[in-house]
């Protein structure tokens, strides 16, 4: 057997491997992207929910934007003032106050006030049910009641009660995961001080709404006429509350004939 015939290709492969390794090592150092250590420090203090409430893709993206000066350090609503303070300490800057937010379920279509119009036997999710003739309830705008929002809440702050999602305000951090999951868009994330809202999303005419749900807004405009601050307007048969004008006086709630204002 010719030893040289065997060793020659082995040596060639070894030399090629060595050169390739040296080139990769050189490239890794030459093209290395310098990472600010503060990005990791900021990421460490964030809650890690990746909820997107800050408006960015997740905690990693938000941390990078904060350190780069492209985002303020007070956008993490789940972390609240404590996290904002830690971010300020890491960056050595003053961080503004965090606006506390809460989820609001804009539906009161309980089992006693609305009805099922079909025996739905498909996958037990709101998304699946909604894809079939807009759900099993008589009101196509209301809560579907399967709890897709419950499954994504990392804080155990929302549950299905009597067929409708209910938010535990003490646990809710306003992350917005539940709102993004709801196919009927009945969950809204609002400033915590906005404690008066219309618990309905139906834009159907009042007479038709009353046939479907006894708690649904009928667009009667009594709340709009009663509000001393001009905080309520009725658009497309549905009342809306402006939280910047509302003083929580309760006048609108007292005159609402269907109890749609919470």
Image (cartoon, rainbow, N blue to C red):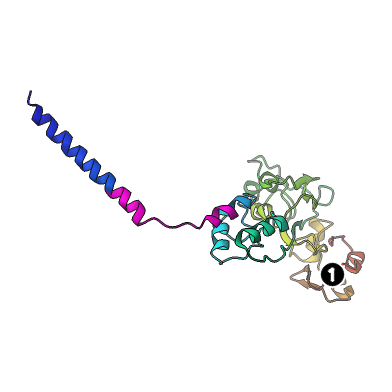
Q: Picture coordinates of residue 34 (x, y %)? A: 44, 57
Q: Is residue 35 magenta-colored?
A: yes
Which sits in the foreground, 189 or 142?
A: 189
Q: Is residue 135 left or right of residue 223?
A: left
Q: Label 1: which residue?
A: 220
Q: Residue at x 54, y 59 (%)?
A: 64
Q: Picture coordinates of residue 78 (x, y %)? A: 69, 54
Q: How many C-alpha atoms fall within 10 Å of the one at disc 1: few (<14), some, or many (≥20)? A: some
Residue at disc 1, secondary structure:
loop
Q: Residue at x 68, y 42 (%)?
A: 120
Q: Residue at x 73, y 45 (%)?
A: 156
State which region is magenta.
23-42
101 above or below 20?
below
- Residue furthest top in the image: 1
Q: Is residue 41 magenta-colored?
A: yes
Q: Residue at x 84, y 48 (%)?
A: 112
- Looking at the rendering, in which quadrant would you find the N terminus? top left
Do we see residue 141 in this rendering?
no
Q: Picture coordinates of residue 203 (x, y %)? A: 73, 65
- Looking at the rendering, in which quadrant would you find the C terminus? bottom right
Q: Picture coordinates of residue 128 (x, y %)? A: 62, 46
């Amino acid at each position: 057997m010719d030893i040289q015939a065997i060793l020659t290709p082995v040596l060639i492969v070894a030399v090629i491997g060595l050169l390739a390794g040296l080139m990769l090592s050189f490239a890794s150092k030459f093209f290395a992207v310098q990472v600010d250590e503060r990005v990791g420090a900021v990421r460490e203090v964030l809650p890690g929910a990746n909820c997107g409430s800050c408006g960015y893709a997740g905690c990693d993206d938000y941390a990078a934007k904060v350190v780069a000066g492209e985002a303020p350090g007070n956008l993490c609503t789940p972390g609240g003032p404590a996290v904002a303070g830690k971010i300020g300490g890491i960056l050595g800057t003053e961080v503004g106050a965090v606006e506390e937010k809460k989820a609001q379920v804009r539906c009161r279509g309980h089992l006693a006030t609305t009805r099922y119009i079909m025996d739905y036997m498909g996958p037990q999710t709101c998304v699946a049910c909604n894809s079939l003739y807009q759900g099993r309830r008589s009101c196509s705008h209301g809560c579907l009641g399967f709890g897709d929002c419950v499954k994504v809440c990392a804080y155990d702050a929302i549950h299905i009660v009597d067929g409708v999602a209910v938010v535990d305000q003490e646990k809710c951090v306003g992350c917005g995961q539940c709102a993004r999951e709801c196919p009927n868009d009945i969950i809204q994330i609002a400033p915590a001080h906005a404690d008066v809202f219309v618990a309905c999303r139906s834009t159907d005419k009042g007479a038709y709404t009353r046939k479907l749900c006894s708690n649904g807004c009928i667009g009667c405009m009594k709340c709009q006429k009663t509000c001393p601050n001009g905080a309520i307007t009725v658009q497309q048969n549905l009342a809306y509350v402006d939280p910047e004008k509302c003083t929580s006086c309760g006048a609108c709630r007292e005159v609402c004939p269907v109890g749609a204002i919470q």
